[in-house]
Amino acid sequence: MPWIKAARSTGVTGQVVTRPRPLDPAKFRDPAVTAKGERRASVALAGLRTLWINTGTLCNITCRNCYIESSPRNDALAYITAAEVAGYLDEAEAAGAPLTQVGFTGGEPFLNRDLPAMLRDVLGRGIEALVLTNAMKPMMNHAAALLALRAEFGERLTLRVSLDHHEAALHDLERGEGAFDRTMEGLAWLARHGFRIHVAGRAGFGAGDEAAMRAGYAALFRAHAIPVDAADPVALMLFPEMDASVDVPEITEACWGILGKSPDSLMCASARMVVKRRGAERPAVVACTLLPYDPQFELGASLAEASRPVALNHPHCAKFCVLGGAACGGCAGARPARLGTIRRAGCADLLQLAQHHHALHGQRRAAAFAAPAAY
Ligand code: SF4
């Protein structure tokens, strides 16, 4: 597999770790065409079904792998207010958008004092609300407000708790010592009080394949009476890894046919995210949850301005969405591309990408034990 032969080194356990080739700097330059001069794929907004709100990047902890670099000091994205969110909900309503879900992500959303008010606004409009949380102290500080929302709106409110791994040692490797226990306490509290719970883990972390990962989570959930079906890909969402420094093929218009995949299955066909940058007078709308900082994915100040198509001009588009099959909102159409499909189609670039994706997952399982700092 020449594409990933770039570097080989030995981890502390003695395992050989093959490092993938770094990203070709000629790629992802032009939103209209790829480095090879082919027409780059783009995704039209089929309908705004999920609106994400970034509540601010501050977090109570610092994780090694946080794609948005949240921490107790990073306020690059400031706290958004309930009034600002209400403006976007009003706009979606007035435009007749088919909005069924509003997701809140951070940072840790419960650090934003307006979160309960924002949730009440969303739920009161008959829209489902999803909160991504580490279920630690910031969430517990809002226990009374959460219980009131649960009593009033029931299962319309979902808490998706981040649990990187079902083993405490590996989760804590990413999130700090004791993080697993504190999150499990929060998870158990949510379960005891009848909240609708989902869990987010990582597909390529630790030993074993996805089936083994799901079996591990299932055992954990059983032991702690957590009502999450570990076999359900939405209830237990296992995300592929994100690494924009690794070389990936660019996605062209021809790729949809080769992969047998519809652009409508990607997150940016049905979602947008509102962010409030530090020092900005008003929030902005970006294409998706994955690219909050890249200016080319900032589409405007309003939902109307942000309804234009999105050019897939970032490595995450190829690796995480088109072949990884990830969708933060749990889109049922999002499925990883299969190696067999790509082999039959005979597209060399995509085959390389898929092989790399699969190989990297295997390597990272080993690397997580051998060289966690490089993860
Ligand atoms: S990262 Fe995914 S959701 Fe975001 S713009 Fe690219 S393809 Fe769309």
Image (cartoon, rainbow, N blue to C red):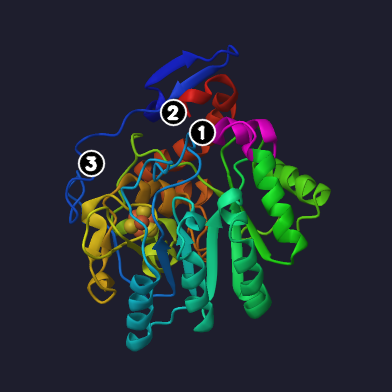
Q: Earlier in the sequence, mark 2 or mark 1?
A: 2
1 left or right, relative to 171: left
Q: Is residue 209 above or below residue 138?
A: above
* Residue type at the position of mark 3: Lys
Residue 161's x, y, as percent?
Answer: 60, 53
Identify the residue shown where x is 41% and y is 64%. Answer: 53
Taking depth in this image into account, of 87 and 7 the one nearest to the observer is: 87
- Residues drawn in magenta: 166-179
Instruction: Give the mark nearer the N terminus: 2 vs 3.
Output: 2
Check disc 3 and report the residue beneath it.
Answer: 27
Which residue is denoted by mark 2 in the rendering? 1
Q: Residue at x 37, y 58 (%)?
A: 79
| Mark 2 secondary-structure assignment | loop
Tell me which corner region of the image, top left, top right, bottom left or bottom right, holds residue 301.
Answer: bottom left
Q: Residues within 10 Å of mark 3 (few under 14, many from 20)?
A: some
Q: Residues within 10 Å of mark 1 (few under 14, many from 20)?
A: some
Gap in angstroms between the C-alphas marked 3 and 1: 22 Å
Q: With 356 as the anchor, is 43 left or right in this view? A: left
Circles 2, 1 touching at the beta carbon (< 8 Å)? yes
User: Does the magenta stretch mainly form a helix, a strand or a loop?
Assistant: helix
- From the image, state whether disc 2 or disc 3 is nearer to you: 3
Where is residue 205 shown, x and y percent of the image?
58, 36
Which quadrant of the picture is home to ligand 1? bottom left
Reading the image, the residue beneath label 1 is 359
Residues at marks 2 and 3, CA–CA distance in whole angstroms: 21 Å
Residue for point 29% across, 74% down: 303
